[in-house]
Amino acid sequence: MTEPRFDEVIHAPTRLAIVSLLAATDWADFKFIRDGAGLSDSALSKQLSILEGAGYVMIRKAFVGKRPRTSVSLSKQGRSAFKGHVAALQQIVASAGTSLRAG
Amino acid sequence: MCYGAPMSEHRMESSDAASELAEIARRQAGAIQAVLVPRWYWWAVGLLLLPIGIAADSHERPYAPVVVVAAAVIIAALSLWMITGAYRGVRIHPATLGSAGPLYIVGFVWLVVGVTLVVAFGLQFEGIPYPGTIGTILAAAMLIVGGPILMSRLRRAMVERSAATPR
């Protein structure tokens, strides 16, 4: 059972989009996340730096032939934080249902 | 109506929390949709099986073995491109796919291979001409029809399993 824990880092809309995409995946290319989240290269780089700083994502740079390729994956800590955040949101929604029924 | 959640001391409207959950579910559904094997893959593999069946029936050397090996290599490369995630630049997380996911995929492949072999050898045993060709036509039809159905089932299962889905 995941402990509900609201996470301000994940809560920001752009980071929520990025982490939600990554949570379903093992890893994803920079381009895939950029297109999926509808961000520019620079905006995505900025948000990934924040997530990396929080220890939520791992960024790997490699070369495929002569082309640089950046792939991103959610770290164990990031996955745990995401699950806690989702559980917190579900708890808020569930509490509202309970209080409405009680009222 | 605000909630002071003890886990974070964060106050949030329930409608905002519901919207955020819906947004997470939408993003995850998008990622899941992207990792599914596209319809054209099933057509490509199905059509690539046909020269294998035709070559197996022709017994013409050296062309038949070359055609079989070439088609098999292309199918293997195409499949590897899909499985590794290189096609879309993303690979699904095992937890999202679930433990039953790989079993469904392997089971489907074995079903197609098994039915094809049984039909082809059965036809050969009965002395019916072109057993390999008929067998691979059947395999192609199974892939083209069954592949997208399998992907649809997997997509539904993965979306239901994703984190934001209410349980």
Image (spheres, coloured by chain):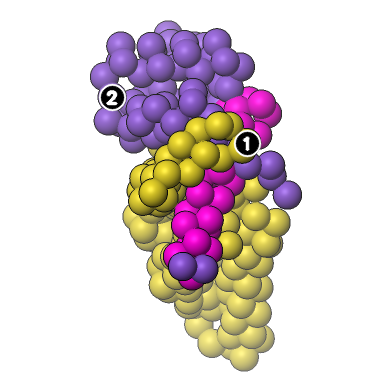
Residue drawn at x 53%, y 56% is A95
Residue hosting label 1: B7
Q: Is residue A95 above or below residue B114?
A: above
Location of residue A5 in the rendering, given as x and y in whole percent from the top left corner: 61, 36
Q: Amino acid at mark 1?
A: Met
Distance from disc 1 to disc 2, alpha carbons, whole Å, reads: 31 Å
Location of residue B132 in the rendering, given as x and y in whole percent from the top left corner: 54, 72
Q: Amino acid at mark 2?
A: Leu
* Marked residue chain, label 2: A
**Quick check: marks 1 and 2 in contact, CB under 8 Å?**
no
- Look at the image and tell me in which quarter the C terminus of chain B lies: bottom right
Residue A39, disc: 2
Q: Nearer the viewer, residue B67 or A49?
A: A49
Chain A hue? purple
Using residue B105 as the reference point, say whether residue A63 is left or right of it.
Answer: left
Using residue B87 as the reference point, say whether residue B69 is left or right of it.
Answer: right
Chain B hue? yellow
Location of residue B142 in the rendering, given as x and y in whole percent from the top left corner: 48, 73
Residue B41, disc: none
**Numbered-mark total:** 2
* Marked residue chain, label 1: B
Secondary structure of the residue carrying numbered label 1 = loop
